[in-house]
Each structure stands twice: as structure tokens, then as C-alpha cells.
Image: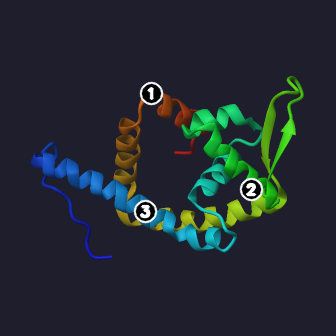
């Protein structure tokens, strides 16, 4: 990669700088997730399937309702993705112990292996970017991204990252 560009410190609130930041977010997101696309495509899966695999790996045993709330998608959209993942033997729904009407989601061994392989590809890219940017930039990134979230999204983020981090 060539040397990253940055706006001058005095111009960070200008419209063109904010638009440039939105461009960064979109292009980085697209480029980063593309690293996992070929492995997904080989199985006839897409990014919606990846999001479910990722979220269930982060929170095994969550209910379909919780996953719907976290992803912010329709029940119909999620139902199709869950069915396809289940049909491929990557995901299973277990009956809840306390409420038998509740379906709790778990990755199968094969699903865990696929999610781990996808994560490793993305981990390598994030680690490379973190190392290139440096500690202060990573802290700034975490701060900025949290300020882009609404309260609901931030609550989900905090629940995924509630355990203390080593300093």
C-alpha cells in the first residue's frame, strides 16, 4: 500500500473530509470482508451467512430473537440464511432448557471450523493494519467507531467485549 493520506488537523470537520471518512469506511469494509468471500462462495454462501456464523461464534447459545436484534434484519431474511447454514451442516438450533419454544443457535464442528478459517483470514488483515497504524491510531479507531454507533449497537458491542482486556 502507498502512504495513507490524512486531512490536515484543522480541517477534520469539513464536509469533504467527513465524506472522505465515509468513503474510507465503505472501501475498507468492502476490501476487508472480500478476503473471506472466496471461501464463502466455494460453499455457495455469502456475507449474510458469514455475519450469522460470526455472531453465533461470538455468542453460542443465543436465541434467534437475540440474533435478529443484534443483526437488525427481518425474520424472513434471517430464516433463509439459518435454513441454508443448517442444511449445510454448519449450524444447529437446540431447544431451550427453560423455554422449549426457544431455539438456541450453535455452530456445528464443521461450522466452527469454517468460521475459524474465515476469522483467521480477517485477523491477519486486521493485525497487519493495526501494526502499520500503531497503538494510538488503533485506540482512535476504536473510539471513532464507537461514536458512529447508536445506543443499541453500542450496547451490543459492549456485551461482546465486556471482559477486561490486558493492557
Q: Nearer the viewer, residue 123 or 45?
A: 45
Question: Which label number is shown at residue 30?
Answer: 3
Q: Position of residue 34 (x, y in %)?
A: 50, 68
Task: State which tag comes first along the sequence, 2 or 3.
Answer: 3
Please say whether residue 163 is visible from this viewpoint: no
Q: Is residue 58 above or below residue 66?
A: below
- Seen in the image, is 19 located left or right of residue 40? left
What's the coloring here? rainbow
Image quarter in which the N terminus is found: bottom left
- Seen in the image, is 71 located left or right of residue 81? left
Q: Is residue 11 above or below residue 146?
A: below
- The residue lying at 38 percent from left, 61 percent from top is 28
Q: Nearer the viewer, mark 1 or mark 2?
A: 2
Instruction: Tell me where residue 74 sits by quadrant.
Output: top right
- The residue lying at 57 percent from left, 42 percent from top is 165
Q: From mark 2 to mark 3, how far is it between C-alphas?
A: 23 Å
Task: State which tag comes first along the sequence, 1 or 2.
Answer: 2
Instruction: Tell me where residue 69 sits by quadrant.
Output: top right
Q: SS class of the residue under badge 3?
A: helix
- Seen in the image, is 77 located left or right of residue 60? left
Q: Position of residue 101 (x, y in %)?
A: 84, 27
For mark 1, what is the residue? 151
- Seen in the image, is 121 located left or right of residue 87? left
Q: From mark 1 to mark 2, how far is it between C-alphas?
A: 30 Å
Q: Position of residue 61 (x, y in %)?
A: 78, 39
Amino acid at each position: 500500500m502507498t502512504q495513507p493520506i490524512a486531512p490536515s488537523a484543522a480541517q477534520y470537520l469539513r464536509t469533504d473530509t467527513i465524506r472522505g471518512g465515509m468513503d474510507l469506511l465503505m472501501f475498507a469494509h468492502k476490501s476487508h470482508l472480500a478476503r473471506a468471500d472466496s471461501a464463502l462462495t466455494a460453499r455457495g454462501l455469502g456475507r449474510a451467512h458469514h455475519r450469522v456464523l460470526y455472531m453465533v461464534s461470538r455468542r453460542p447459545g443465543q436465541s434467534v430473537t437475540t440474533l435478529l436484534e443484534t443483526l437488525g434484519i427481518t425474520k424472513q431474511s434471517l430464516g433463509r440464511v439459518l435454513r441454508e447454514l443448517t442444511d449445510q451442516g454448519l449450524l444447529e438450533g437446540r431447544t431451550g432448557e427453560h423455554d422449549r419454544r426457544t431455539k438456541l443457535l450453535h455452530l456445528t464442528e464443521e461450522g466452527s471450523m469454517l468460521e475459524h478459517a474465515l476469522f483467521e483470514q480477517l485477523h491477519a488483515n486486521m493485525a497487519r493494519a493495526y501494526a502499520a497504524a500503531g497503538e494510538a491510531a488503533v485506540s482512535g479507531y476504536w473510539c471513532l467507531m464507537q461514536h458512529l454507533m447508536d445506543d443499541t449497537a453500542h450496547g451490543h458491542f459492549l456485551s461482546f467485549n465486556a471482559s477486561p482486556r490486558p493492557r
